[in-house]
Image (spheres, rainbow, N blue to C red):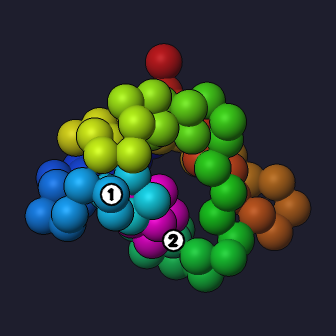
Amino acid sequence: MISINLRRIWDYSGYARTPKAVRFIKEQAARHLKTSIDNIKIDESLNVLIWSRGLKKPPRMVKVKVEKEEDNYILKLVG
């Protein structure tokens, strides 16, 4: 389980926040798992949570569970 703080994303302008949050989550997971960002996939439930408040207001923190499938890692929402 990885807790990813998205506080830094709020430094960007409003319309860039949620796409940057998705990219930031993948980058942080790749860093913890010591793999390439291309091997990280986001589960639909996590994607819905990130985009639930729209383009301008992603959540401040997410907790993800990592599952490995073949060469890829899938990030799933905890809870």
Q: Which portion, as a residue range, is magenta? A: 21-27
SS type, badge 1:
helix
Q: Amino acid at mark 2?
A: Ala
Numbered badge on residue 30: 2
Give me the residue at 64% from left, 64% from top. 40
- Judging by the rendered image, the residue that carries numbered circle 1 is 15
Q: Left or right: 42 with respect to 68? A: left
Give me the residue at 20% from left, 63% from top. 13
Q: Label 2 neighbourhood size at 10 Å, few (<14), some (14-19), many (20+)?
A: some
Give me the residue at 68% from left, 76% from top. 38
Residue 77: x percent and y percent? 52, 32
Query: Which quadrant of the rendered structure holds the N terminus?
Result: top left
SS type, badge 2:
helix
Q: For the residues carrying marks 1 and 2, which lies nearer the camera in this image?
A: 1
List the single residue furthest toward the front: 15
Dominant secondary structure, magenta: helix
Q: In 3D space, how far apart are the residues under numbered discs 1 and 2 (Cα atoms)? A: 25 Å
Residue 8: x percent and y percent? 17, 62
**Do we see residue 14 in this rendering?**
yes
Q: Left or right: 64 with respect to 48? A: left
Q: How many marks?
A: 2
Q: Quadrant of residue 76?
A: top right
